[in-house]
Image (cartoon, helix red, strand yellow):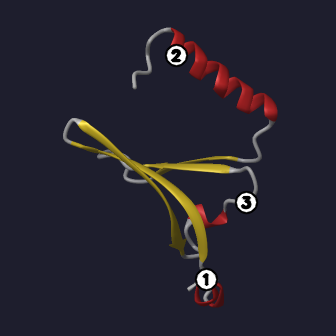
């Protein structure tokens, strides 16, 4: 399967997805075969990409190119502050 994907320039990426089902939030993490034309297939190294699908903006995609340790530390600090404020619940 991987060889066949490479022959047509497709890529496998570990894709994290989350969606709402009624009042519940569901999530999955799995390898997904993507065509080379998909923006998510172009992500390399530590670069991350998130794509939002809403009723107003059907495909809003944000890319963070090569985050630095400072960027990562900032995100962790924000998470810890939100936890301390009680904004995250198990």
The span from disc 2 to disc 1 (Cα, nearest Å) is 41 Å
Counting residues from the N terminus, which is met first, the one under dot 2 or under dot 3? 3
At a point 40% along the width and 26% down the height, the residue shown is 90
Does residue 14 lie above or below 36 as drawn? above
* Distance CA(mark 2)–CA(mark 3): 30 Å
> Helix, strand, or loop for circle 1?
helix
Q: Are marks 3 and 1 in contact (CB under 8 Å)?
A: no
Q: Which callout, 3 or 1, points to the residue nearer the camera?
A: 1
Q: Nearer the viewer, residue 53 or 30?
A: 30
Residue for badge 2:
82
Identify the element where label 2 is drawn.
helix
Q: Which mark is residue 44?
A: 3
Q: Which mark is residue 29?
A: none
Please, is residue 39 above or below residue 85 in the view?
below
Q: Is residue 63 left or right of residue 21?
A: right
Which residue is at a point 43% across and 16% down the rendered structure image?
87
Q: Name the residue at the front extreme.
A: 90
């Amino acid at each position: 399967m991987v060889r066949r994907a490479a022959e047509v320039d497709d890529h496998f990426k570990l894709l994290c997805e989350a969606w709402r089902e009624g009042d519940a939030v569901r999530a999955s993490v799995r390898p997904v075969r993507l065509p080379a034309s998909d923006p998510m297939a172009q992500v390399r190294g530590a670069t991350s990409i998130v794509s939002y699908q809403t009723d107003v903006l059907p495909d809003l995609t944000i890319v963070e190119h090569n985050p630095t340790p400072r960027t990562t530390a900032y995100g962790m600090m924000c998470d810890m502050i939100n936890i301390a404020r009680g904004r995250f619940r198990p």
